Image: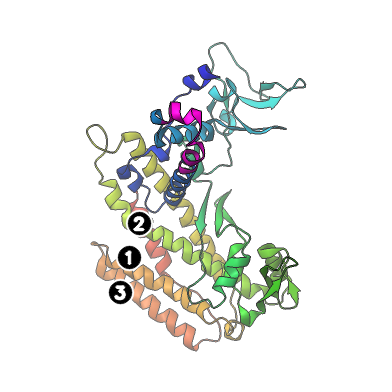
């Protein structure tokens, strides 16, 4: 085992990146993931030191170890552990020497034989000759963020981010915010997924807690358990939400107003995607100008991977935004149907107003672009006030997307 550990290479995961290199991730989903991981590792290291402080092992070895060693332990496991069939996550010497190759480039799969041994099996239709490299898949379904986070690299030929996770929060003016946080039993955000053929799917139950309130029938009670503790119970109309956000979504789907709830959710997600795109766009020029390579504090490999991640995530969000826009345009709801949630429409107009802020910062084409966007906002606001139907014709979205595309690296 000692020889095996000594033979493991040191991986360049983002947890080892310098502050200047981590700055390149601003606007990507990897930035908060790395920051959260580093905080978690610091807490773990402090706990290890505290727990082992009075042991003989710590008296002998403690002075020779520091936080960097804990980073190495984490990197060794995270970058080499395999999800083995019938075993679970584990490190398998020799098998974990195999490099990753996606899709048809994968030569072998890892399995457990009848005797319980870890083995590599040649994929159907694949052949090997002496000297050929044996490759496995680290997970074709894993997104660009997860690949760089866990393995420290992105395939140069990677054409899509595959998937990414964006966080969501309850509005500060939501009077049920505290209670919703108490009962939220799902990840606070949603996942965008490249579904292929230009389509983008999304998954996430947290958004349904955001888009319904007391006026829709959501309410909370405080109950006392048999041991005297208090717990929050959530209800949608007469139904107790024992199944959490997933059950809320199921009940909303059975409602005659589901089209309204779904449109609220789409607008929330569209706005969140827009906000993230805006951060990427606003920082892109500065990130490209960062000195990198020999003689700088930014390694060429880290720079290239960060730029590739920025491009792939922006392109996926761009397509998601356009898809959300299509969904909004397909739903023409009477104003009376939206009366119970008036902030819905103004969140859409807010997208246009945010786009104006982006256009104002652009040095070229400023006057014509700004005039077009401002007229669009005025028309949208007028439509919201006087028309029987809401028709979301916000050309500002495509204006922003076009500007962002021109300013991102090819």
C-alpha distance separating marks 3 and 1: 13 Å
Which residue is under mark 1? 358
C-alpha distance separating marks 1 and 2: 9 Å
The majority secondary structure of the magenta stretch comes to helix
Give the quadrant of the C terminus. top left
Q: Residue at x 40, y 42 (%)?
A: 308
Q: Are marks 3 and 1 in contact (CB under 8 Å)?
A: no
Q: Are marks 3 and 2 in contact (CB under 8 Å)?
A: no
Q: Position of residue 144 (x, y in %)?
A: 49, 43
Foreground mark, 3 or 1?
A: 1
Tell which circle, 3 or 1, labels the residue nearer the N-terminal end.
1
Q: Position of residue 85 (x, y in %)?
A: 70, 32
- Choose between 156 and 112: the one closer to the eye: 112
Q: Which residues are magenta?
A: 46-62
Q: Does residue 264 appear in this view?
A: no
Residue at the extreme top of the image, as rendered: 130
- Choose between 395 and 339: the one closer to the eye: 339
Which residue is under mark 2? 281
Q: Position of residue 346 (x, y in %)?
A: 47, 78
Q: Residue at x 53, y 46 (%)?
A: 162
Foreground mark, 3 or 2?
A: 2
Whether the magenta-drawn stretch holds residue 137 is answered as no
Which residue is under mark 3? 371
Q: Are marks 1 and 2 in contact (CB under 8 Å)?
A: yes
Q: Does residue 73 appear in this view?
A: yes
């Amino acid at each position: 085992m000692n020889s095996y550990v000594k033979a493991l290479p040191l991986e360049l995961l983002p947890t080892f990146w310098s502050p200047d290199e981590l700055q390149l991730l601003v606007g990507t989903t990897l930035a908060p993931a790395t920051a959260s991981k580093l905080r978690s590792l610091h807490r773990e290291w402090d706990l290890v030191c505290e727990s082992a402080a009075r042991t003989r092992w710590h008296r002998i070895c403690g002075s020779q170890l520091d936080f960097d060693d804990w980073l190495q332990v984490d990197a060794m496991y995270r970058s080499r552990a395999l999800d083995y069939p019938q075993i679970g996550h584990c490190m398998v010497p020799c098998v974990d020497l195999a490099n990753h190759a996606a899709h048809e480039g994968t030569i072998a799969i890892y399995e457990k034989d009848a005797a319980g041994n870890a083995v590599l099996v040649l994929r159907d239709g694949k052949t090997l000759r002496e000297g050929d490299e044996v490759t496995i898949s680290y997970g074709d379904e894993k997104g660009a963020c997860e690949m760089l986070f866990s393995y420290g690299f992105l395939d140069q030929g990677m054409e899509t981010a595959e998937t990414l996770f964006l966080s969501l929060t309850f509005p500060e003016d939501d009077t049920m915010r505290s209670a919703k946080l108490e009962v939220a039993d799902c990840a606070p955000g949603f996942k965008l997924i490249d579904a292929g053929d230009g389509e983008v799917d999304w998954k996430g139950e947290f958004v349904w807690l955001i888009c319904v309130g007391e006026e829709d029938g959501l309410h909370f009670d405080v109950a006392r358990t048999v041991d005297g503790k208090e717990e929050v119970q959530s209800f949608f109309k007469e139904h107790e939400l024992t199944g959490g956000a997933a059950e809320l979504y199921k009940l909303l789907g059975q409602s005659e107003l589901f089209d309204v709830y779904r449109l609220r959710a789409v607008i929330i997600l569209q706005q969140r995607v827009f906000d993230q795109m805006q951060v990427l766009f606003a920082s892109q020029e500065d990130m490209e100008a960062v000195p990198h390579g020999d003689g700088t504090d930014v390694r060429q490999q880290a720079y290239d991977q960060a730029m590739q991640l920025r491009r792939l995530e922006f392109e996926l969000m761009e397509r998601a935004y356009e898809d959300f826009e299509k969904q909004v345009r397909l739903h023409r709801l009477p104003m009376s149907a939206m009366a119970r949630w008036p902030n819905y429409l103004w969140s859409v107009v807010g997208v246009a107003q945010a786009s104006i802020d982006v256009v104002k910062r652009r040095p070229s084409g400023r006057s014509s672009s700004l005039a077009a966007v401002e007229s669009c906002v005025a028309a949208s606001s007028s439509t919201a006030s006087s028309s029987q139907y809401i028709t979301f014709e916000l050309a500002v979205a495509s204006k922003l997307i076009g500007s962002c595309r021109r300013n991102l690296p090819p």
